[in-house]
Image (spheres, rainbow, N blue to C red):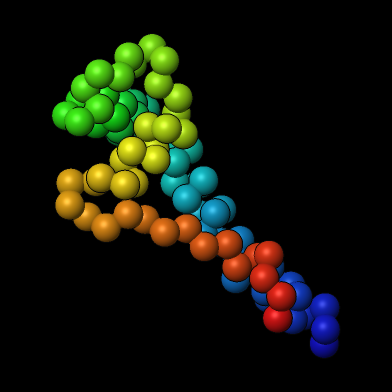
């Protein structure tokens, strides 16, 4: 019974990652490229206009997108896999 509980816990907590990875690999290339350009453009314009795009890292661009995404609240990521209980 214990192994069934842990198997269910693993499936419950890994399906969002597996689904988003599957979706990302099955989207059309032009759409993925457009999304990347959109995030990079957001990270180098407006209040970030003095940023050199050649020196902008991917994680910094995503952080800027999350913190100021056109008035939407930032996305909060939770990792339930590492919690006890």
- 57 or 11, nearer to the observer: 57
Tell me if residue 72 can be seen: yes
Tell me if residue 37 can be seen: no
Decide if residue 30 is on the left or right side of residue 56.
Answer: left
- 4 or 77, nearer to the observer: 77
Q: How many marks?
A: 0
Could you tell me which residue is drawn at 39 percent across and 40 percent down? 63
- 1 w.r.t. 51: above or below: below
- 53 w.r.t. 61: above or below: above
Decide if residue 22 is on the left or right side of residue 82.
Answer: left
Decide if residue 67 is on the left or right side of residue 85.
Answer: left
Q: Residue furthest right?
A: 2
The quarter of the rendered structure image containing the C terminus is: bottom right
- 20 or 54, nearer to the observer: 54
Q: Position of residue 39 (x, y in %)?
A: 30, 32
The quarter of the rendered structure image containing the N terminus is: bottom right
Could you tell me which residue is drawn at 47 percent across and 58 percent down? 77
User: Which quadrant of the view contains residue 7?
Assistant: bottom right
Q: Position of residue 40 (x, y in %)?
A: 31, 26
- 76 w.r.t. 66: above or below: below
Decide if residue 33 is on the left or right side of residue 72.
Answer: right
Q: Residue furthest bottom?
A: 1
Could you tell me which residue is drawn at 44 percent across and 41 percent down? 24
User: Which quadrant of the view contains residue 43?
Assistant: top left
Q: Position of residue 3 (x, y in %)?
A: 82, 78
Could you tell me which residue is drawn at 60 percent across and 68 percent down? 80
């Amino acid at each position: 019974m214990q192994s069934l509980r842990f198997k269910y816990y693993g499936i419950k907590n890994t399906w969002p990652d597996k689904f988003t990875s599957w979706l990302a690999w099955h989207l059309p290339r032009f759409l993925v490229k457009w999304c990347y350009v959109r995030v990079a453009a957001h990270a180098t314009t407006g209040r970030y206009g003095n940023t050199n795009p050649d020196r902008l890292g991917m994680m910094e661009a995503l952080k800027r997108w999350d913190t100021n995404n056109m008035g939407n609240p930032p996305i909060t990521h939770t990792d339930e896999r590492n919690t006890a209980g």
